[in-house]
Amino acid sequence: MEIPMIDFDKLDGEKRIQTMALLHQSCERWGCFQIKNHGIDAKLMEKVKHLVNTYYEENLKQQFYESEIAKRLGSASDVDWESSFFIWHRPVSNMERIKDLPKDFCTTMDEYINQLIKLAEKLSELMCENLGLEKSCIKDAFSGSKGPSVGTKVAKYPQCPNPELVRGLREHTDAGGIILLLQDDQVPGLEFLKDGEWVPVPPSKDGTIFVNTGDQLEILTNGRYRSALHRVMADKNGSRLSIATFYNPAGDAIISPTPKLLYPNHFRFQDYLKLYATTKFGDKGPRFESLKEMTNGHHGLLA
């Protein structure tokens, strides 16, 4: 099995229908996909990776190998073989408060995030289109009082002398919404669970960005778009770079399934049979929509 690849160049041409269908299937069946020709500046992406690698080498590498995590290798199952920190971008940035973070790092990351947010919003609109929702539905649901929350987990998964003894990151789903990953182009390690099988995500070549959907999107879509279990394997031959940006609901956003994606509920079976008698040989989708309208009180079905 291979992780699906979405080519954004095909969204404006004769292959738009097939590309939108592939995106829809990826969200429904995988909970993840890769995208290329997404419009984010390739040189900017490479600069971000270079600055993160430099910061790790100068400030975090020695600290990690002297840490309790490294010392406890093989003696505990509740640790992850990773060195990471978190940057908030929206609604308020915290980069100026992170120790020894160079100014060039901050300005470059800001430029990258501005482009990435546009990509996240474009993805959310495409997802809404595929689900038959208003194009701003996901963004509106995530906005709260100050707009969606955006942050980046900057991580290195250091070279490990005994990778069989530890995970780079233990199995989990992501709590948030849409996750956009700029990752290593050489060292593998990320794996997603698909149909009971762990599928490796290849290192990102030629500027591809890896995307996965989180728990809040699964809830918002009433389970149509799933959050997939994933993990990071430790590696004996190299250190893996991971720059994962989370396009999430605001802290005060109220999340619930979008009404249009809910099945009808709270109806009498005898009333369903009346509707069924006149629509039996038609598609069930319009029948369900009619039933939702009826149970919402438009026709007094439950009176």
Image: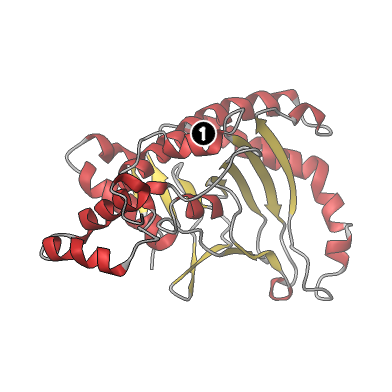
In the rendered view, tell whether residue 181 sits above or below residue 9: below
Q: Amino acid at mark 1?
A: Leu
Image quadrant assignment for residue 150: top right
Residue at x 89%, y 62% (from the top left corner): 68
Q: Tell whether 66 sits left or right of 54.
A: right
Residue at x 84%, y 76% (from the top left corner): 75
**Residue under numbered circle 1:** 116
Q: In this orientation, which residue lies closer to the viewer: 57 or 14?
A: 14
Please identify the residue farthest to the front as the structure is shown: 303
Q: Is any atom of residue 222 visible in this view?
A: yes
Q: Tell whether 175 sits left or right of 41.
A: right
Residue at x 31%, y 55% (from the top left corner): 301
Residue at x 35%, y 47% (from the top left corner): 297
In the rendering, at what x and y percent does residue 37 appear?
Answer: 37, 38
**Looking at the figure, which quarter contains the N terminus?**
bottom left
Q: Is any atom of residue 204 visible in this view?
A: no
In the rendering, at what x and y percent does residue 123 appear?
Answer: 41, 40
In the rendering, at what x and y percent does residue 246 appear?
Answer: 59, 43
Q: In this orientation, which residue lies closer to the viewer: 145 or 99?
A: 145
